[in-house]
């Protein structure tokens, strides 16, 4: 597994990681009852259906999940330490802030 996928999996599976990484839940996710939010986050943590169709670069940075008849996406983006620009090197955790966003598909 490559370093980017390893760092992304760590953030997604543990919903935290050392450093300045962030998790963002959109309005559609936040509007769910708390128990449903927790169940959705569990599905994101356990997601492992990465394949050629949805993970071309093998970075494990995007996924689609169905929860109670609604489709949700998760996406990991890479920013520089100021969060103003994209990271120069997403494989370097010392200069990259990862932002994991979880959203309803219709919010994308």
Image: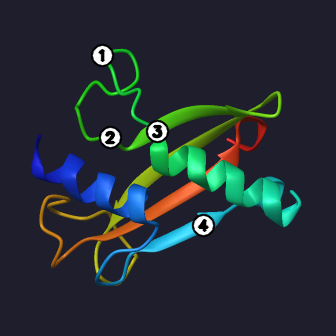
Mark 4–mark 2 Cα distance, whole angstroms, equals 17 Å
**Where 69 falls versus 35 (above or below)?**
above
Which residue position is annotated with label 3?
47
Is 7 on the left or on the right of 30, as rendered? left
**Where 8 falls versus 64 (above or below)?**
below
SS at mark 3? loop
Pointer 4 or 1: first along the chain: 4
Seen from the viewer's position, the closer of residues 73 and 16 is: 16
Which residue position is annotated with label 4?
24
The answer to whether the residue labelled 3 contacts the one labelled 2, judged by CB atoms less than 8 Å apart, is no
SS at mark 1? loop
The answer to whether the residue labelled 4 contacts the one labelled 2, judged by CB atoms less than 8 Å apart, is no
- Between circles 4 and 3, the one closer to the viewer is 3
Which residue position is annotated with label 2?
60
Q: Quadrant of the N terminus?
A: top left
Is 59 on the left or on the right of 3, as rendered? right
Tell me, for residue 52, which label it has, or none.
1
Pointer 3 or 2: first along the chain: 3
Q: For the point 47% across and 74% down, which residue is it?
A: 22
* Quadrant in which residue 24 is drawn: bottom right
């Amino acid at each position: 597994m490559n370093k980017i996928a390893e760092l992304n999996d760590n953030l997604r599976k543990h919903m935290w990681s050392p450093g300045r990484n962030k998790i963002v839940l959109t309005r559609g996710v936040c509007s769910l009852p708390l128990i449903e939010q927790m169940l959705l986050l569990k599905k994101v943590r356990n997601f492992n259906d990465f394949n050629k169709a949805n993970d071309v670069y093998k970075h494990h940075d995007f996924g689609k999940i169905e929860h109670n008849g609604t489709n949700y996406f998760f996406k990991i983006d890479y920013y520089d330490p100021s969060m103003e620009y994209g990271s120069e090197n997403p494989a370097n955790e010392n200069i990259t802030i990862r932002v994991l966003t979880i959203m309803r598909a219709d919010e994308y």
